[in-house]
Image (tube, grey):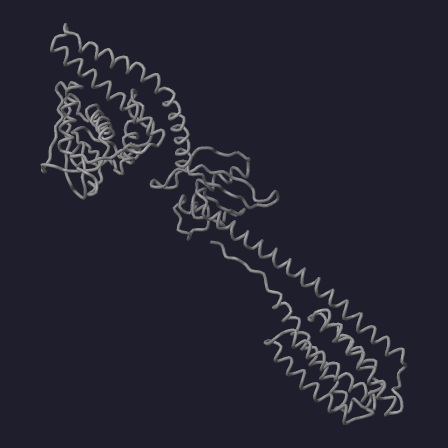
Amino acid sequence: MPRTFAPASPESALRRELYFFTLYRVLEAGLLALVLFSPAGALIEEPRHLVLGRAAATGYLLAAVILFVAGRHGLLRRQALIGVVIDIAAATLAMHALPASGSGIALMLLFNIGAASLLLRLRLGLGAAALAGAALTGEYVWSELVDGGAGRPLAELMMFAVSFLAVATLTYLLGRQMRASQALAEHRGAVAANLAEASELIIRRMRTGVLLVDGDGRIHLANEAAMLLLGDDGGERQLDLAAPELSRRLRRWRKDNVSDDTPLQFAPDLPEVLPRFTRLLADSDQTLVFLDDTSLLSRRAESMTLATLGRFSASLAHEIRNPLAAISYATQLLEESKEILDADRRLLEIIHQQTQRMNGIVENVLGLARRERAQPEHVELVGFARRFVEDYRNGHPLEGDSLNVVTQRPAVPAMADPRQLHQVLIALVHNALTYGRMPGEPARVTLSISHEHGPQIDVLDRGPGIPEMVAGQLFRPFFTTSGHGTGLGLYIARELCRANQATLEYVPVAGGGCCFRIRLPGPHSLLPT
């Protein structure tokens, strides 16, 4: 799964703002202490109350350092509120000790009120501004009553009080808008990061191989499918070395804008691929290379063809059943005739059996098209194989060929649908008798019944065998080496085995010949035998 990028919380953003605010307070307190304790301060102004000023500066510097250290933890708004109250108290005492610098101190306090309002709720920010105005008013009255005058006009005091309220309101609104914008930007950034991560995961897990190649032929990106199709373990990042033919086609496409639609195979044990090229950007030298696995395309085409075949077989079933029913009915009428010789009655019986079997084949093909389930039951394979061989001999004259059953066990129970198993054996035996013979020699087909790791039937012949390149395509639909076959026999046989929870596989035989092995599930103890 892609990593989830959570946006930064508003608390972390406010904590960062509080950090810079407390740092400014330390610098502010240090500047006030420098004025009151250093000789340079005398050049600026002679304090009216030196002891009071130094005490206020010392306490303010100590409180500023404590607030700076404690600002990383604890309740944020409480720390901001305590800090602005301390700012107001220290500014009031400093203005009383340094009356000539009162305007500058009030301006510094104005910034503190604004910074605190960024962090506080509106009513607390306005409360701090009102407290600052009240403190300046109190200091003005104190100076007038005790020290014989503040040295500042009353209008200045009123302007500072109004400025405190205005700045508190404006900075609160500005802070709220900034935090909303920051939260929106972080949310969109997180969404974009998640989408980028999801896109990367999708590209990495795509069945189509994707390569990003620059103008120098260096591979910058390769998903899992591309590495599998190239046979690369991720160590080679130069396309000329990883796939020389693909690199040649890419250079030709860049030069002439002509694509070669011939499939490529990078190694004998790798599937064929069809490369496609496209530029990443119109003015970029980077190229996206898509590698389509032709086997996937072939399977999709086969699925579409089989779906069409299913619809065709469903529409054709009615037309096939009608003549079968007529043949079966006519056969039954002939069997009732007393003028039919006994030898001919045997032929009529064979005709009737074969019509019934043909009807069963039609039903099985339709069931395969509709993906109907099999109806398995207990089957004793030794007796079933012997009955099958007898029926096959009666319905298909073998002439000089032979069809036998061999087994070392008296009985091998299994679970299967007898009709479908009969059809599978018909297809396998017919192939063995047709193709499993040496030139000029009769066919020798054997049904071997055994119980190795479960019930199994081996259909063996003594023919020339199957080439290795052909063996990998035996069960593909419509694949045939004969000009008269449809290529559906082995495919339908394997699908019928799958419907019975069985497997059908080709097993090479040493010394010639071939073997098709059917592995069946064992009998279920809860079903009646």
Q: Give the answer, above or below, for where 389 lies relative to 97.
A: above
Q: Residue at x 52, y 43 (%)?
A: 288
| Left or right relative to 231: residue 436 | left
Q: Residue furthest top?
A: 339
**Coordinates of residue 470 in the picture (x, y in percent):** 28, 32
Instruction: Give the camera-side residue of 375 and 509.
Output: 375
Instruction: Give the camera-side residue of 256 and 351.
Output: 351
Instruction: Give the camera-side residue of 392 and 334.
Output: 334
**Coordinates of residue 259 in the picture (x, y in percent):** 50, 34
Which picture quadrant has residue 481?
top left
Which picture quadrant has residue 283?
top right
Q: Residue at x 21, y 42 (%)?
A: 526
Q: Give the answer, above or below, for where 66 lies relative to 291.
A: below
| Left or right relative to 403: residue 115 | right
Q: How many marks?
A: 0
Q: Residue at x 12, y 20 (%)?
A: 400
**Coordinates of residue 395 in the picture (x, y in percent):** 18, 19
| Left or right relative to 291: residue 526 | left
Instruction: Give the camera-side residue of 296 and 83.
Output: 83
**Coordinates of residue 10 in the picture (x, y in percent):** 62, 65
| Left or right relative to 168: residue 441 | left
Q: Residue at x 70, y 80 (%)?
A: 27
The quadrant of the picture occupied by the C terminus is top left
Q: Give the answer, above or below, for where 47 lies relative to 5.
A: below
Which picture quadrant has residue 375?
top left
